[in-house]
Amino acid sequence: MPRHAQTDPTARQAGGGTPPKFTPQTLAFLRALARNNRREWFHERKDRYEEVVRAPMAALVERLAVEFRDFAPDLVATPRASMYRIYRDTRFSADKTPLKTHIAAVFPHRLLPKHEGAGLYLEVAPQHVWLGGGMYMPATSQLHLVREHIAANYRRLRTIVESPGFRRTFGELTGERLKRVPLGFPKDHPAAEYLKFRQFLAGCEKPAAFATSPGFYRTLVAAFRAAAPLIAFLNAPLVADRGRTADPAVWLSSER
């Protein structure tokens, strides 16, 4: 191995080359979009959006696909499947602004529809960056499967969420919770506190400028590594229940 490859930290990263990150122009565009959330304004500047917002995210997703081979091989990372559209669905929302003012990507399990199960997630907005993952809005049937899995494997879950890396990165498992242990489980079950969760989230929020910092990519990958065992744990009962081979058309058709 050449001497410079042994000392250059970027040379050791998957994919090689300069680690991807966003630029001040990315944040400037998102701030301007927040002030001018109109289709006409955006269409006049769509080329600029593609250059300074969408292209950096696409490059990041493609680089993460290489990283995931090492610690999250079951997760999908492609621009088409992972990146969200800029246009909002306003049909059932009181907020009729037509455009999202952030850029985001999700990394779901390859055997589950895009918005089912647990996945990793990144969001860059004018005022913040959110990174981490989990299970945000599980259907009732999915939640029941996950709770049964927790009841049978609570020691494994405790090991994941109490590990030094998880605690250092995310603090603790968060999400909406019931006040009581759900029906069907003993009130004194050793996993009682985990069984109360309706959402399972591991995330951290940072200032928007973090997305442009030299340590952005390194910190993002470290956070995804810390969250990956939780994602795998939550997906295990859903993948087992589905009992089918991967069908990319399912999660691609659910893209929004």
Image: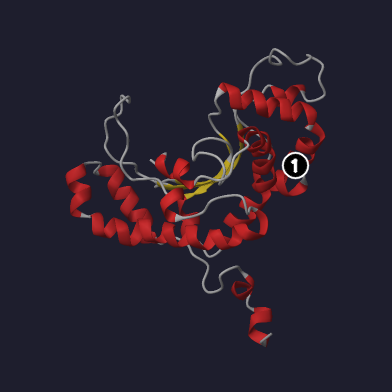
- Seen in the picture, residue 140 relative to 246 is either above or below; the reply is above
Give the residue number, with chain letter if any, for mark 1: 160
Can residue 114 be spotted in the picture?
yes
Q: Amino acid at mark 1?
A: Ile
- The location of residue 80, given as percent across then percent down, is 41, 52
Label tally? 1
Can residue 123 be spotted in the picture?
no
Residue lying furthest bottom = 2
- The location of residue 90, given as percent across then percent down, is 30, 30
Left or right: 32 in relation to 238: left
- Seen in the picture, residue 49 relative to 15 is either above or below; the reply is above
Q: Residue at coordinates 78% horizontally, 36% vertically from top-left?
A: 158
- The location of residue 174, given as percent across then percent down, is 63, 32
Q: Residue at coordinates 75% horizontally, 16% vertically from top-left?
A: 185
Quarter of the image with the N terminus in it: bottom right
Quarter of the image with the C terminus in it: top left
- The location of residue 195, given as percent across then percent down, is 71, 23
Q: Residue at coordinates 77% horizontally, 40% vertically from top-left?
A: 162
